[in-house]
Image (tube, rainbow, N blue to C red):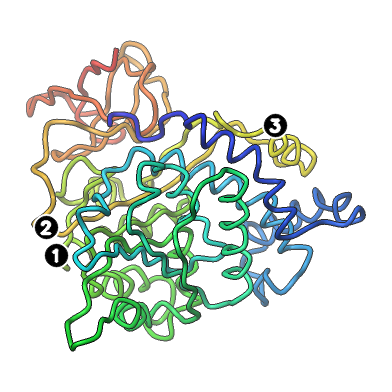
Amino acid sequence: MRQLFPPLSAQTVKALELLPEALARVRPLKRAHKRSLPEDVAALSRLLTVERRERQLPYWSSPAFVSAYLYYFLPWNLLRQTRLLSSLPLPDPWLNAPQGEALLLDAGSGPLTLPIALWLARPEWEEAPVRVLAVDSANQPLELGMALFSALGELLGRKPWPVRAARGPLEHLPRLARQTAARGGGAPPPPPWLVAAANVLNEAGRHLHEGGGMDESPERLAEIFTVTSPSALLFIEPGTRLGGKTIMRLRESARQNGFAAASPCTHNGPCPLLAGDGGKTWCHFTFDTQGAPSWLTRLSNEAGLAKNALSLSPLLLLPQAQKQAGGTEVRVISAPFSVPGLAGFARYACSAGGLLLLEDAGRAVSGEALSVQADKNAPHDKKSRARVVHSDSR
C-alpha cells in the first residue's frame, strides 16, 4: 500500500466512538474526577515531556494519572496505531501458526494498546488463531487492558483474541516466549508470529538491568528481540528526536542480527539519515487527525492540548529470508517546504541510494511511497547534499 497512514475504516471509527463507554465499564469516573480530568491530562502530559527527567515514580501509581492515561493517551495511541497497522505488510497469522497458534508477544504492553489496535485495524484476522502474551513490569495496566479488550469486544459484538499477561523486564522476553509456546512431548516451541513493542524503546533506560543506559539500549534491545526468532518484529515509537533516533539505531543493529527492514523503509541498505546529515534529523512521519472522535477532540481542547497532526516513528522487520526484493520506490519523510530555485514545494524522501530532495512534491503526503527516477548525475542540494529529483506524486 502506497499510503502509510490510510483513513480509518468505518468499523474502527465506531470503536473509537464507543471507547468512553468501554472505559466507563473498566475505569468509571466520579463526577469530581470527570471535572478534573482535563487538568489531570495536562499534568500527565507535562510529566511525560518537559518534566520527564524529574519523574521518580511510574505514573501508574497515581489514580488521577491512570484515568488521564486511559481516557486521553490511550485513545490517541489507538488512533495513531490503527492508521498505521492497517497498511503494514505484516505476515499472515493463518500462515504463521505451525502448531495451531500464532503468538503475538507484546513487550511493555501497558493497557494492551497495540494488541487492541491491531485487532481493530485487521478485522479479517478476528478468527485467526492469534494468542496474545502481554508483558509489562506492572500488573495494573495489564489488568486494565485485558478488561478493556473484553468490554470493547462486547460493545462491538466481536471476539477479542485470548490474552495471557506476564510481568517481567524486557530481558525475560525470550524465556517468557518459550514458556508460553511450549508443548508437551519434548517438541521445541514454535517461534512467535509477531513480537511488538510500542512506546517502549525510548523508556528502555528505565527497564534494562544492563547496558549502561539509554545510549546503549537500542543495540542491547536488538539482541533481546531478535533472539526470539519471530516471523516479524514491529516497533512503534513517538515521532520525537529520541524516538526516531532510537528506531534508526535499532534498525541498524537488527540488520546485523539477520533481520531486514520491511516498512516504512523501501530498502534494506544503511539508513541515509543515520550518518548522512550529522545527526540533525530523524526518521518520523506526521499525518492528520482524521478519524478522531469528537469526545476526544473536546477533551484535548479542554486540556489545552489541541491536535491538528499526529506523528510516529515505526519500523517493521522481517527475517532476511522473508524480505521481498526492494523496488524503485522511495518514502516521503518530511513536511513540504520551499527551496529557492525549485518548482513548487519540496519534500525529503528516503531511498536505497540515499536521501533525496523531491521537487514539486507539495501534493504528496508524509509516509507516501512514490516511484521516482533518481539519476546518479542529478544535482545535489547545497544544504542537505540530497540529490534533487522531480516528483511524480500526482
User: In the displayed structure, would residue 172 be above or below residue 26?
Assistant: below
Choose top left, top right, bottom left or bottom right for residue 87: top left
Q: CA distance from mark 1 to mark 2?
A: 6 Å
Q: Is residue 108 left or right of residue 179?
A: right
Q: Is residue 282 above or below residue 321?
A: above
Q: Residues within 10 Å of mark 1 (few under 14, many from 20)?
A: some
Mark 3 or mark 1, whichever is nearer to me:
3
Residue identified by numbered label 3: 294
**Which type of secondary structure does the marked residue at label 2 adopt?**
helix
- Which residue is nearer to you in this view: 149 or 335? 149
- Tell me the element at label 1: loop
Name the residue rendered at 19%, 37% in the picture.
Answer: 351
Amino acid type assigned to the residue bearing label 2 in the image = Gln
Q: Earlier in the sequence, mark 3 or mark 2?
A: 3
Assign the C terminus to one quadrant of the image. Answer: top left
Question: Are circles 3 and 1 on residues that touch, CB within 8 Å?
Answer: no
Residue with the mark numbered 2: 320
Q: Position of residue 308 (x, y in %)?
A: 60, 31
Left or right: 285, with 138 as reference point = left
Mark 2: few/some/many CA within 10 Å (<14, 14-19, 20+): some
* Pointer 1 residue: 258
